[in-house]
Amino acid sequence: MASKVFAPAKINLALHVTGRRDDGYHLLDTLVSFAPVGDWLTISDAETLSLTVEGPEAAGVPTDMTNLAMKAAALLAGRRGARMVLDKRLPAASGIGGGSADAAAALRGMAAPALDADALLRAHADGILGLGADVPMCLASKPLRVRGIGEGLEPVALPDIPAVLVNPRRPVSTPAVFKAMTRRENTALPEVLPALPDADALIAFLRGTRNDLEAPARAVEPVISAVLDALSAQAGCGLSRMSGSGATCFGLFTSEDDARAASRAIAKANPAWWVASGVLGDQSGAAMPRLCES
Ligand code: C5P
């Protein structure tokens, strides 16, 4: 028997960079939600720890200890081994947390069914944060406000919202984008978020927020501007923005039909791009390990 775990894409709906710590890490204030689009990690018992990567986005993904899923599994494996097979569907180095989502899936799969995400995080806080700033939020896989460098997680009530995700298939280096920033001390999100009962309210609120990494990322990888233009030109697109340090951008819609039509149109006009659509929201249930035949 094996267990299969979903690793949903993380979308930074807003990402404000509010300062920099002495160790060089940037302080963030970000609002994240999760997409029903992601990688799948299948874990079965084995003598040793191993990883195989397959699927449409497998090219170039390491299978050794430099892969975050291996590091995460090693953290919980102890003397136990595990055979992991990663079905890689999210483009790598693309601002939607792919590697971190895989690490979170490995942690869930290795711990299951003993611990839920909160308990896992409490029990292994330092080790999990040591895997990368995005791993704790991916472990939660539900709408959050995250402050600090990724450790200050606060669940927030956000409405489900239809979205289109577009990546131009150019990997972007996160450190290079942070380095290209010209202003590192920017305003935080409002201390108290307003009530956001539906997609219209969420879009209206987000229009007053930013992704402070968008301008430096566009300077590092100019094709990001073309991706944002393609999204904002679609009928019904209420907001287009980059996620994380890029290059994946998202468009938000109030109608699922409009989002699907936009996704089809962008994919048709740009066959080399990675395009997906789905309703962003709480994916914590979808991300729970489920038993499967191996
Ligand atoms: O945490 P993660 O490994 O994803 O970060 C990659 C790099 O991005 C860090 O080494 C750092 O240079 C930069 N970074 C940062 N501030 C953050 C997160 C990442 O400067 N909050």
Image (spheres, helix red, strand yellow):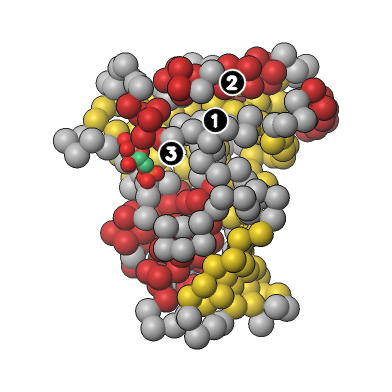
Residue identifier under label 1: 247
* Residue 209: percent from left, percent from top: 47, 20
- Residue 145's mark? 3
User: In which quadrant is the N terminus drawn?
Assistant: bottom right
- Which mark is nearer the camera, 3 or 2? 2
Label 2 belongs to which residue?
223
Which kind of residue does numbered mark 3 sit on? Answer: Arg
Residue 206 shows in this picture: no
Front one among 131 and 188: 131
Q: Does label 1 or label 2 sit earlier along the sequence?
A: 2
> Tags 1 and 2 in contact by the CB under 8 Å rule?
yes
Per the rendering, the mark at residue 78 is none
Alpha carbon distance from label 1 to label 2: 8 Å
Cα distance, mark 1 to mark 3?
Answer: 21 Å
Secondary structure of residue under mark 2? helix
Screen quadrant of the C terminus: bottom right
Q: Give the answer, above or below, for where 168 lies relative to 278.
A: above
Amino acid identity at mark 1 = Ala
Circle nearer the N terminus (1, 3): 3
> Going 71% across and 34% down the picture, which residue do you hit?
275
Q: Is mark 3 within 8 Å of ligand 1?
A: no
Please tell me which residue is depicted at 43% across the width and 38% down the height of the picture.
Answer: 145
